[in-house]
């Protein structure tokens, strides 16, 4: 199969557990791009913390950010598409978080806002290269693409149990566990898979010409959409079951291994036969 587009999750997939890119992975992705394939990072991050990863790779292009709620062109950044909403639609959720001391932030296509943040939370933002802006009352904001809760895995387990009981989401919204310590709430129309489908169609690329690689629940729909969906070995079982195959873990250069197997080795074999 001649692939034309590589869709890559970032945290837990492209980066290791220390949020680092290996030199081997960088070289492989540059080789893949030089071979003529498009590389699209598909991440729960916003552009501010995703663009530095793209810069470290030494490539430019389109980013699918906020778990599919905003698609951004680099350099720029220029917002190509986003699915936004007024925060008043999530008033019950905001009041629940305030009452239960669950930290949250709200995201426009390009910026992240908090009402307050303790030192531990600020350390998390620093780790993800994020500089939050302040809002006195997020419920007054519009044009939001994603609402994110950050806490311990145990507390977020309780939050997930509270959906539909202690607070209600409008039918036009869905929530997804994007990491052990993160729950994202977005419009139902927002997902990595739907954003990837729209972007690929705009480029005239068919699903069977796409490789998608990810490691968590928010990656499942793009893994299923792609002609070849690959899960990292550090993925939960549900993600592995959704994939066509599993590669090595994010700490073992799994992205490199998958792209050598499915892109670079076939290209090299084709050149040697010609």
Image (cartoon, rainbow, N blue to C red):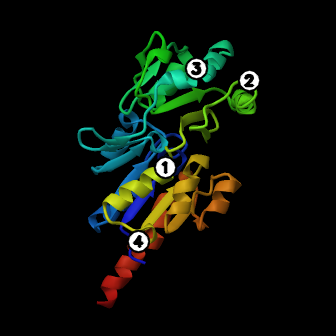
Label 4 neighbour load within 10 Å: few <14, some 14-19, many 20+: many
**Foreground label between 3 and 4:** 3
Residue that carries the numbered disc 1 in the rendered image:
192
Sequence-wise first label, 1 or 4: 1
Tell me the CA gap for discs 3 and 4.
47 Å
Decide: marks 3, 4 in contact (CB < 8 A)? no
Q: Tell me how far mark 1 sits from mark 2, CA to CA.
A: 28 Å
135, above or below 127, in the image: above
Q: Choose the circle earlier in sequence order: 2 or 3.
A: 3
Task: Give me the C-alpha separation between circle 1 and circle 3.
Answer: 25 Å
Label 3: how many Cα within 10 Å (few below 14, some 14–19, many 20+)? some
Q: Which residue is mark 2?
A: 166
For the point 43% across and 65% down, the residue is 210
- In percent of width and height, residue 74 lies at 27, 44
Helix, strand or loop at mark 2: loop
Foreground disc of the pair 4, 2 = 2
Question: In terms of image quadrants, where is residue 56?
Answer: top left
Helix, strand or loop at label 3? It is helix
Residue at mark 4: 263
The answer to whether 267 appears left or right of 19 in the picture is left
| Residue farthest along the bottom direction in this orientation | 273
Q: Secondary structure at mark 4?
A: helix
Q: Residue at x 41, y 71 (%)?
A: 263
């Amino acid at each position: 199969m001649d692939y034309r587009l590589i869709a890559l999750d970032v945290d837990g997939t492209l980066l290791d557990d220390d949020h680092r890119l290996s030199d081997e992975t960088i070289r492989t992705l540059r080789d893949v791009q030089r071979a003529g394939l498009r590389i699209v990072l598909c991440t729960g991050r916003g552009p501010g913390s995703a663009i530095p990863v793209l810069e470290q790779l030494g490539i430019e292009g389109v980013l699918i950010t906020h778990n599919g709620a905003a698609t951004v062109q680099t350099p720029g950044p220029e917002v190509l598409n986003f699915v936004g909403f007024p925060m008043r639609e999530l008033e019950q959720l905001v009041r629940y978080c305030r009452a239960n001391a669950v930290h949250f932030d709200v995201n426009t296509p390009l910026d992240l806002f908090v009402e307050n943040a303790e030192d531990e939370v600020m350390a998390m933002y620093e780790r993800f290269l994020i500089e939050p802006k302040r809002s006195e009352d997020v419920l007054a904001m519009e044009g939001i693409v994603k609402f994110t809760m950050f806490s311990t895995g145990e507390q977020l387990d309780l939050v997930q149990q509270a959906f539909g009981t202690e607070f209600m989401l409008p039918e036009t919204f869905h929530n997804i566990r994007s990491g052990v310590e993160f729950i994202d709430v977005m419009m139902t129309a927002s997902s990595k898979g739907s954003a990837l489908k729209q972007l690929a169609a705009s480029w005239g690329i068919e699903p069977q010409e796409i490789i998608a690689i990810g490691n968590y629940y928010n990656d499942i729909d793009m893994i299923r959409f792609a002609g070849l969906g690959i899960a990292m070995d550090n993925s939960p079982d549900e993600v592995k079951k959704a994939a066509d195959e599993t590669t090595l873990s994010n700490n073992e250069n799994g992205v490199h291994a998958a792209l050598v197997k499915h892109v670079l080795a076939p290209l090299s074999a084709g050149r040697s036969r010609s």
